[in-house]
Image: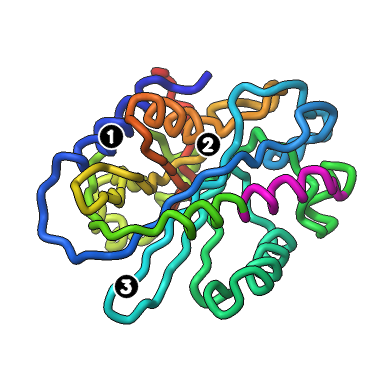
């Protein structure tokens, strides 16, 4: 079960940034969102490598969220696409870049496009093209691959076509019960001098970018928190963005016409499954 405490803590950090006042430069900003939910029946999930864990319905849909930033002085662009996926496989990345080269020649390429994932373990697999990743899925699943690529492209199109002047604010906050180190003994094997640099055996900081229109209206949030989206176990059969996807859903439902992406950061050995949850 996805922790309401964890999601609530994330919401506080995200919303605090809405009211944070700071001096920022002006950018051209585009934001887009599109569905990338794959086959919801009889396709094995990517993440736990459990061949018995196949999709049998949808708990919440998966999305690609595109955040486009253009420097108003140089016209240089950065396109960050956040996806409710275990990972953006190389095949997906290559196909998206190929389609971008055809549709937006000279604008988007491997130098300014980042495809990023939440790392959910509750989505259909079969998009890697590598034996190691697809063996537990029983092969390549074209229906899932095509849906992901087309959804990412649709999100990029929406961002490209919604560019407007705005500002970006940066915020961070501590989420102290967002996860635990699942390998504490291994962490203790690090040199004492290194461990002394940190107050915890995990990173508890959530970081967020807030995108505003020129009139000050919040348009989007792109946040990062280092915890695995594995609140749902191998017993789960429903497609879901897990804890990060649930937080995105709740925040987008709460905020008016705002696109919210919460991505994985340096999660390493950080599990969301606390004993007192």
Q: Nearer the viewer, mark 3 or mark 1?
A: 3
Q: Is residue 58 left or right of residue 263?
A: right
**Residue under the point 26% across and 50% down:** 213
Q: CA distance from mark 3 to mark 1?
A: 35 Å
* Residue designated by label 1: 176
Of the 4 image quadrants, the one containing the C terminus is top left
Q: Quadrant of residue 77?
A: bottom left
* Colour mapping used in the image: rainbow
* Residue designated by label 2: 229
Q: Position of residue 117 (x, y in %)?
A: 55, 50
Q: Quadrant of residue 276?
A: top left
Q: Is residue 147 magenta?
A: yes
Q: Position of residue 59 (x, y in %)?
A: 62, 22
Q: CA distance from mark 2 to mark 1?
A: 17 Å
Between disc 2 and disc 1, whose residue precedes?
1
Between disc 3 and disc 2, whose residue precedes?
3
At label 2, counting other C-alpha atoms closer than 10 Å, the crowd grade (few under 14, some 14-19, many 20 or more) is many
**Residue under the point 68% across and 41% down:** 47
Q: Position of residue 186 (x, y in %)?
A: 48, 49
Indicate the secondary structure of the residue bearing disc 1: loop
**Residue under the point 43% across and 43% down:** 261
| Between 133 and 212, the one nearer to me in the picture | 212
Q: Is residue 119 left or right of residue 94?
A: left
Which label belongs to residue 71? 3
Q: Is residue 244 visible?
A: yes
| Between 223 and 26, the one nearer to me in the picture | 26
Q: Is residue 189 visible?
A: no
Question: Which segment did they paint magenta?
Answer: 140-153
Indicate the secondary structure of the residue bearing disc 2: loop
Between disc 3 and disc 1, whose residue precedes?
3
Tags 2 and 1 touching, CB below 8 Å: no
């Amino acid at each position: 079960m996805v922790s309401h405490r964890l999601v609530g803590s994330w919401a506080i950090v995200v919303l605090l940034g809405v009211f944070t006042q700071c001096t920022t430069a002006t950018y051209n900003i585009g934001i887009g969102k599109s569905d990338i939910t794959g086959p919801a029946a009889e396709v094995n999930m990517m993440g736990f490598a459990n061949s018995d864990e196949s999709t049998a319905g949808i708990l919440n849909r998966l999305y690609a969220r595109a955040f486009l930033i253009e420097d108003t002085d140089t016209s240089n662009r950065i396109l960050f696409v956040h996806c409710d996926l275990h990972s953006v496989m190389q095949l997906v990345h290559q196909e998206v870049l190929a389609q971008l080269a055809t549709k937006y020649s000279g604008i988007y390429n491997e130098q300014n496009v980042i495809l990023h994932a939440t790392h959910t373990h509750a989505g259909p697999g079969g998009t890697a093209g590598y034996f190691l990743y697809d063996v537990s899925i029983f092969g390549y699943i074209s229906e899932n691959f095509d849906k992901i690529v087309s959804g990412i492209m649709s999100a990029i199109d929406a961002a490209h076509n919604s560019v407007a002047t705005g500002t970006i604010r940066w915020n961070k906050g501590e989420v102290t019960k967002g996860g635990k180190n699942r390998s504490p003994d291994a962490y203790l094997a690090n040199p004492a001098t290194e461990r002394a640099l940190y107050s915890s055996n995990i990173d508890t900081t959530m970081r967020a970018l807030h995108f505003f229109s020129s009139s000050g209206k919040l348009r989007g949030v792109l946040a990062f928190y280092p915890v695995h989206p594995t609140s749902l176990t191998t017993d789960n059969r429903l497609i879901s963005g897990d804890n990060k996807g649930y937080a995105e859903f709740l925040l987008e439902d709460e905020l008016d016409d705002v696109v919210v992406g919460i991505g994985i950061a340096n999660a390493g050995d950080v599990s969301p499954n606390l004993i007192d949850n």
